[in-house]
Image (cartoon, grey):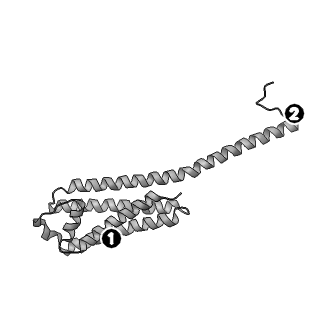
């Protein structure tokens, strides 16, 4: 089964974090414009603190690392989901955990800078990440449950065939004629 939703969500989050990283390093208002895309209006009084290289470089690198993890999850989902679903599940889990950690660090750093309205925006983004992760888990669970149901049907059919063969063998050994259980005596 193809994991269309997992692929789409991995691509979406990779694109979001890559664009945030490129917005951080580009232009005169890098971090402020990236926070503006998230929905946080940064006042000019905090603008000077956000353009310091010690803030911009680690933030952009961390955002790019998260974007690369989601790209890796996308590639793993597209290529290796049929051969080793546990491997791609681990990559997806690492990507979502690192994205949640990155948003938490943005919340802590923004609170230290005194940026207003940051908690609600980060809470919405974390909720979206959680909903995405739950959707990915549900899709993976449904894909793993389908072959198990088919295997259970085969096992039940095998038990029924074995029982019928055993019953037929016992009736032949005992010399009694095999009776049809559906017919009444």
Pointer 1 local density, CA inside 10 Å: few below 14, some 14–19, many at least 20: many
- 146 left or right of 37? right
> Tags 1 and 2 in contact by the CB under 8 Å rule?
no
Across and down, in percent, residue 94 comes to 40, 62
Left or right of 29 in this view: 152: right
Q: How many numbered marks appear?
A: 2
Quarter of the figure with the C terminus: top right
- Residue 140 picture location, percent across and down: 48, 54
* Element at label 2: loop
Which of 166/30 is in front?
30
How far across and down, in percent of the image, does residue 178 sit?
84, 34
Observer-nearest of 163 and 15: 15
Classify 157 as above or below 67: above
- What residue do we see at 87% from left, 35% from top? 174
Relative vertical location of residue 117 with respect to residue 17 in this rendering, above or below? above
Direction right: furthest residue: 175
Residue 94 is at least partly visible in this image: no
Q: Earlier in the sequence, mark 1 or mark 2?
A: 1
Residue, disc 1 = 64
The answer to whether one can see residue 80 in this image is yes
Residue 46 lies in quadrant: bottom left
Rendered location of residue 139, percent (x, y) = 47, 53
Q: Nearer the viewer, residue 91 or 25?
A: 25
User: Hey, which residue is sitting farthest left in the picture?
Assistant: 45
**Residue at 56% across / 50% down in the picture?**
146
Identify which residue is drawn at 44% across, 61% down: 7
Tell me the element at label 1.
helix
Q: Residues within 10 Å of mark 2 (few under 14, many from 20)?
A: few
Q: Disc 2 designates what residue?
A: 177
User: How far apart are the alpha carbons under marks 1 and 2?
Assistant: 77 Å
């Amino acid at each position: 089964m193809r994991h269309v939703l997992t692929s789409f969500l991995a691509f979406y989050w990779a694109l979001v974090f890559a664009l945030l990283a490129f917005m951080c390093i580009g232009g005169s208002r890098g971090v402020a414009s990236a926070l503006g895309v998230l929905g946080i209006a940064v006042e000019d009084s905090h603008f000077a603190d956000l353009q310091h290289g010690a803030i911009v470089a680690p933030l952009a690198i961390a955002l790019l690392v998260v974007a690369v993890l989601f790209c890796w999850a996308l590639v793993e989902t597209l290529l290796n989901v049929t051969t080793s679903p546990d491997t791609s599940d681990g990559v997806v889990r690492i990507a979502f955990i690192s994205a949640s950690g990155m948003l938490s660090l943005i919340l802590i750093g923004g609170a230290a800078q005194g940026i207003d309205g940051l908690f609600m925006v980060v809470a919405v983004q974390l909720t979206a990440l959680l909903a995405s992760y739950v959707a990915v888990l549900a899709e993976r669970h449904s894909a793993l449950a389908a072959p198990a149901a088919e295997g259970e049907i085969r096992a039940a059919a095998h038990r029924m065939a074995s029982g019928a063969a055993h019953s037929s063998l016992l009736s032949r050994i005992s010399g009694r004629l095999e009776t049809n259980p559906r017919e009444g005596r």
